[in-house]
Image (cartoon, grey):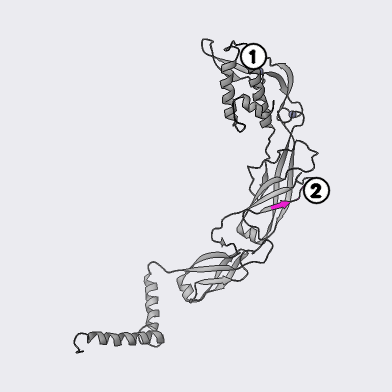
Amino acid sequence: MGTENAFAELGLAPDATDSEVKAAWRRLVSQWHPDRNDSSDAVAKMQRINQAFEEIRRAGSRVRTDDPATEGATPDEADANARGNDDAAHRHRRPIFRKVKLRLEEAAVGCIKVLRGKITNVCSTCAGAGHQVLGGNCAQCGGSGAMAKRSFFGWPSGYFECDACLGGGIARQPCPTCDGSGKMDARAYKIKVRIPHGVRHGDLLHVAGGRSRADSPPADLEIRVEVSDHAFFQLDADGTIRCEIPVDGFAWIANRSIQVPTVTGLHALQLDREQLSYRLKGQGFPVTRRGSRGDQVITLLPIFPDSLSTDQQILLDQLLATTSGDGRGSDARLRAWSRGLRAWERGMSGLGSTEA
Ligand SMILES: [Zn+2]
Ligand SMILES: [Zn+2]
C-alpha cells in the first residue's frame, strides 16, 4: 500500500496531520473492531485500517531533522538536513541548510563564523521505523492493533492503540541496529565559514563541505544570511548608512569635535554650527558584496537643556550681553535689522495723522 492509498484508506487527505491520522484511526477502529462489528468483512477492514496506519507512521518516521548548534550563529530549528540521507554512499547529497545571524558591523567588514551541527542518518536496517516486523499477529492485541478500554463494569468503552505493535497488529521487535531509535550515524560536523564583506540580509552563501577534514560537513552548506536590525545604523540599498546622533547643542554651537560611531569603530567628527548633516566618505556599507564602501550620513539632533540652572542662566546672560544691542561684538546683520525696525516703528506712529 502506498502512502497516498494509506491516507485514502483512512479517509484523509495526503497532508493530514499526525493527530488527524490518529483521530481517523480511532474512529474507524471503534466502527470496525470485531468486538463491535460482526459483519463478515470487519476483520479484513481492520487489517486494511491498521496497514494504512502503519504505512503512514513509517513514512513519517523517515524524515529526521538535524540538530544544529552553531558557535557565534543562531541554530536553525527549521533545518531538515537529513531528508534523503538514507543512502550514506550517495555522492550528491542535498545541501545542509543553515542560517547565520550577523550584526551589521560583521556584514560590513566580513567575518569568520564557526558552524557546528549534527547530521543524523536514518537507520538502514529498519528504514527509520525503529522496529522490525516479525510477521504474525501481535501477541498483546491478537492482531487487531487496538486494545479496548473497559468501563468499571467491564464494558468496552472505546479503543486505544496497542503499545506492543503501535496499532499495526503485527508482531514486531525493536530494531537491534539502532536500538529502536530509527537513527544511526549521528555525526557532528564543524566548519569555519568566511563571510565576505558586504553580504546583505537574505543573501545565500554556498559553502563546499565534505572534503577537507574528518569533521567537515558531509554535504555542501546553503547558508542564509540574516543581518540584525541595528540600534542606530540604518542601511540604504546603495550602501549609505544613516545615523542620527543627539549632540549637546552648546557643543554644536561651539564647533566642538565629537566621537561618532561607524561600522569599524569610533570616528572623530568636527562639528560646524552651520551644519546639521555630515557625510563620512567611504565609512558606510559595501555597495556590492566584496565591493568598496559607500558613505555614512550623520544627522545631528542638537539637544538644549529643557530648563536652565541658575549658573547656566548667568552664563547665557553674559554671553548675550556680548552679542546683543548696539555693543561691540554684535553682528552687522543684527545692527542693520535694529535700525530698520526703528525706522519702521517711527513710520507706524505717524499712521492716521498724516494727510494723503
Ligand atoms: Zn498489538
Ligand atoms: Zn533501526
Position in image of residue 232 (x %, y %): 54, 61
In which quarter of the view is residue 180 placed?
A: top right
| Real-space CA distance between mark 2 and mark 1, rounded to the nearest whole angstrom | 55 Å
Q: Position of residue 99 (x, y in %)?
A: 65, 49
Where 246 falls versus 62 (above or below)?
below
Above or below 2: residue 164: above
Nearer to me, 310 or 103: 103
Q: Nearer the viewer, mark 2 or mark 1?
A: 1
Task: Give me the residue at 67% from left, 38% from top.
Answer: 65
Q: Quadrant of residue 120?
A: top right
For the point 61% across and 12% down, the residue is 34
- Secondary element at tag 1: helix
Q: Judge whether residue 134 is colored magenta.
A: no
Give the numbered dot on residue 211.
2
Residue at horizontal 40 percent and vertical 85 percent from the top? 333
Q: Badge 2: how crowded within 10 Å, few (<14), some, or many (20+)?
A: few
Which quadrant, please, contains the C terminus? bottom left
Q: Look at the image and give the residue range highlighted in magenta.
A: 205-211
Give the position of the N terminus as an image quadrant: top right
Which mark is first along the chain, 1 or 2?
Answer: 1
Q: Which residue is mark 1?
A: 43
Quick check: which quadrant has ligand 1? top right
- Mark yes or no: residue 88 visible: yes
Which one is in front, 329 or 50? 50
> Which residue in the rendered view is the most extreme toward the bottom?
355
* Residue 159 located left or right of residue 311: right
Res. 105 mark: none
